[in-house]
Image (cartoon, grey):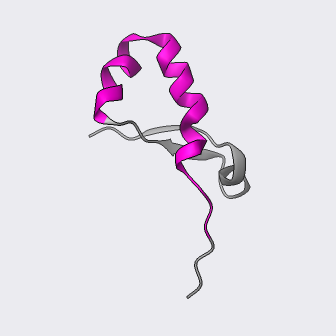
Amino acid sequence: MVVLTTHSMGEIAEVHHRMPLILKEDELRDWLYDNAVSEKLLEQGAAALKKEVVEN
């Protein structure tokens, strides 16, 4: 198992300076071997994470 992090972007930056980078299984090979794809995935990292207010 590997946990990747990147600089936080968007709403996540309000909470923490780093955020997880979640890759799908079919993105792993490109992440490792294609720099252009890696950079694109880094830019899109924030899209998968949204801030949500949870009331207790």
Which residue is at the far bottom? 56
Left or right, residue 33 beside residue 37: left
19 in the magenta segment: no
Residue 53 in which image quadrant: bottom right
Q: Which residues are magenta?
A: 25-52
Quarter the N terminus occupies:
top left
In front here: 39 or 47? Answer: 47
Pinpoint residue 20: horizontal percent, then vertical percent.
49, 45
Q: What secondary structure characterizes most of the magenta part? A: helix
Q: Position of residue 32 (x, y in %)?
A: 36, 17
Asked if residue 47 lies left or right of residue 29, the reply is: right
User: Where 35 falls versus 12 (above or below)?
Assistant: above
**Which sits in the foreground, 5 or 44?**
44
Q: Is residue 24 left or right of residue 16?
A: left
Residue at x-position 55% and y-position 51%: 49
Q: Is residue 51 above or below residue 35?
A: below
